[in-house]
Amino acid sequence: MNNNDYNKAKKYSELRKAGKYVEAKKYANLSDADLIGANLSDADLSGANLSEANLSGANLIGANLIDADLIGADLSSADLTRADFGEANLSGANLSGAIVNIGNVYRRIEASR
């Protein structure tokens, strides 16, 4: 992660801690970012690099994650309701306790890595 990306991730983390909405950007490089509990509902994160990011407990309701890189990301206990993961890479991602919507059925994932 370069210095500019680090500063962006730090800003997002500070916003999250202040309880404010996190502004997400298409194609953003947020690899290794600390986004625990962040509000990313309806965010356009298409093509974003979120590899190894910590998104545990994050609100990703309705987020656009098409073609996002989520390799090794921690999505444990995140709310993924209506999130679009089309062509996203979730290899090695931790989805334990995550809430997902499959059709009209809501489920909490119990599996771990």
Image: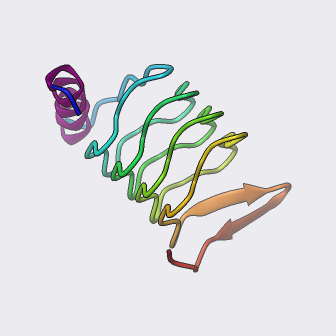
98 lies left or right of 6: right
**In this view of the protein, which residue sits in the foreground, 27 or 104?**
27
What's the residue at 35%, 29% (across, down)?
A: 22
45 in relation to 73, above or below: above
Q: Which colour scheme is used?
A: rainbow
The residues colored magenta run 3-17
- The foreground one among 37 and 35 is 35
Q: Which of the two residues, 30 or 84, is positioned nearer the viewer here? A: 30
Query: At x 66% / y 59%, what residue is drawn?
Result: 100
Quarter of the picture holding the N terminus: top left
In the image, residue 64 above or below residue 69: above
Residue at the image point whose x is 36% and y is 52% from the top: 52
Q: Is residue 55 left or right of residue 94?
A: left
Residue at 44% across, 35% down: 49
Name of the residue lying farthest toward the right: 103
Q: Is residue 110 above or below residue 41?
A: below
Spot occupied by residue 26 in the image (x, y as percentages of width and height): 50, 20
**Secondary structure mostly taken by the magenta-highlighted segment of the chain:** helix
Q: At which x and y percent is residue 25?
A: 44, 20
Count of residue discs = 0
Nearer the observer, 6 or 102: 6
Residue 96 lies, in percent from the top left, at 51, 72
Q: In this view, does 12 lie to the left or right of 80?
A: left
Q: Quadrant of the rendered structure where residue 24 is?
A: top left
Task: Please indicate whether residue 78 sits to the left or right of residue 63 in the image.
Answer: left
Residue 42: x, y in percent?
A: 57, 30
Membership of 57 in magenta stretch:
no
